[in-house]
C-alpha cells in the first residue's frame, strides 16, 4: 500500500516488511532487477524540479520512507506510513539475514578505497556474508563499461549503489537490464559501513533528528537542509489546496 507525498508514492512498510520483500525476491531468483529507493524530504523536493528523477522514484518497485519528514507528512493523508525505515539500518538488516543464506552483494559508490573498507568491515561484522565485488563512485565512461561487465559476470543478488541522489537512482534505472535480483539506492551508507562517517547517536536516531546532528557536525550542509522547511511548506500548501481541487 502506498501513500502519495507531493506526487511521489511511498510504500507504507516497516523495516521487517521491506526486508521480507528483499528476501522473497532473492529466493525467487528471477533476476528482474527490482529497484528500491529511499526518499527523504530533500529528495522529494528535488523530484519536483527534475522530471527524470521523479519518474525513476515513481517507477521503483519499493519506495521506503527514509526521512522522518516523510513519515510526518504522511500523517496528513488517509493512508499513513507506519514507521521510518532508515536506509543504512535497512541495508545492515539485509546483511544480517543473508549472511548464512544464498545471497551475494556488490557495492558501488563512495570515495576511493571506501567501498573496499566497507566490504572488509561488513564481512567481519557479519561472518558468512559474501560481498563479491565493489568499486568506488568515481569512474569515467570507460570504467563504467568495465564495472557493468563485472556486475554482469558476477550476477550479485543485491547491487548497492551509493552515488548520491539523483545520480544513483538514475544510474540504477539506466542499468535496469543488469542480471541482479535487486538494486538499492543507499546514499551515504557506504561511508557509514566503512567507518569514514559516524552515525548520529542513538538518541538522535530515535527522535528522528539525524539531520540535525549532521548539520551540527557539518555546518556546510546548511543550504541543503533548507529543503526540509521547503518540503514542510509544500506539503501544507498541497493539503490546503486539495479541497479546492476536488470541487
Image (spheres, rainbow, N blue to C red):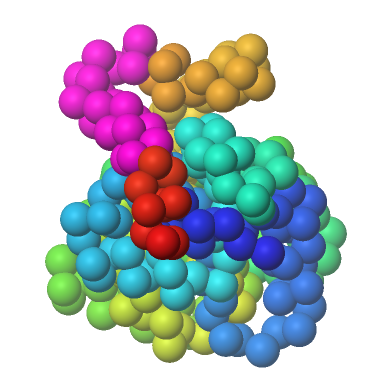
> What residue is drawn where x is 65% and y is 68%?
104
Q: Can I make out residue 95 in this image?
A: no
- Pick whichever, 142 or 178, lies toward us: 178
| Residue 183 position (above or below residue 218) | below
Task: Tell me which corner region of the image, top left, top right, bottom left or bottom right, holds residue 220.
Answer: top left
In magenta stretch: residue 222: yes
What is the x, y in percent for residue 162? 39, 52
> What residue is drawn where x is 58% and y is 57%?
3
Q: Which residue lies furthest to the right in this view?
A: 100
What is the x, y in percent for residue 138? 23, 55
What is the x, y in percent for residue 246? 43, 61
- Pick whichever, 125 or 167, lies toward us: 167
> What residue is drawn where x is 56% and y is 40%?
76
> What residue is drawn where x is 51% and y is 19%?
209
Viewed as shown, does residue 83 lie left or right of 147? right
Figure quadrant of the N terminus:
bottom right
Task: Tell me which corner region of the image, top left, top right, bottom left or bottom right, holds residue 129.
Answer: bottom right
Viewed as shown, does residue 133 lie left or right of 17? left
What is the x, y in percent for residue 62? 58, 65
| Residue 116 position (above or below residue 214) | below
Query: Most prominent secondary structure in the magenta stretch?
Result: helix
| Magenta range | 215-237
| Residue 198 position (above or below residue 129) | above
In magenta stretch: residue 88: no
- Pick whichever, 187 or 158, lies toward us: 187
Amino acid at each position: 500500500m502506498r501513500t502519495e507525498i507531493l506526487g511521489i508514492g511511498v510504500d507504507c512498510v516497516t523495516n521487517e516488511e521491506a526486508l521480507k520483500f528483499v528476501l522473497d525476491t532473492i529466493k525467487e531468483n528471477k533476476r528482474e532487477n527490482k529497484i528500491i529507493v529511499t526518499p527523504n524530504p530533500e529528495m522529494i523536493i528535488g523530484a519536483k524540479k527534475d522530471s527524470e528523477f521523479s519518474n525513476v522514484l515513481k517507477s521503483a518497485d519499493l519506495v521506503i520512507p527514509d526521512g522522518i519528514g516523510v513519515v510526518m507528512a504522511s500523517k496528513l493523508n488517509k493512508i499513513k506510513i507506519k514507521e521510518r525505515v532508515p536506509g543504512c539500518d535497512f541495508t545492515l538488516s539485509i546483511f544480517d539475514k543473508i549472511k548464512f543464506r544464498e545471497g551475494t552483494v556488490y557495492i558501488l559508490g563512495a570515495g576511493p578505497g571506501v567501498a573496499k573498507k566497507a566490504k572488509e568491515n561488513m564481512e567481519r561484522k557479519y561472518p558468512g556474508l559474501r560481498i563479491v565485488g565493489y568499486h568506488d563512485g568515481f569512474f569515467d565512461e570507460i570504467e563504467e563499461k568495465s564495472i557493468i561487465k563485472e556486475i554482469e559476470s558476477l550476477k550479485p543478488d543485491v547491487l548497492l549503489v551509493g552515488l548520491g541522489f539523483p545520480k544513483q537512482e538514475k544510474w540504477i534505472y539506466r542499468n535496469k537490464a543488469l542480471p541482479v535480483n535487486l538494486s538499492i539506492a543507499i546514499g551515504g551508507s557506504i561511508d557509514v559501513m566503512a567507518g569514514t562517517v559516524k552515525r548520529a547517536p542513538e538518541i538522535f536516531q530515535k527522535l528522528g533528528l539525524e539531520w540535525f546532528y549532521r548539520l551540527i557536525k557539518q555546518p556546510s550542509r546548511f543550504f541543503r537542509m533548507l529543503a526540509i522547511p521547503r518540503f514542510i511548506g509544500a506539503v501544507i500548501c498541497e493539503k490546503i489546496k486539495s479541497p479546492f481541487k476536488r470541487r
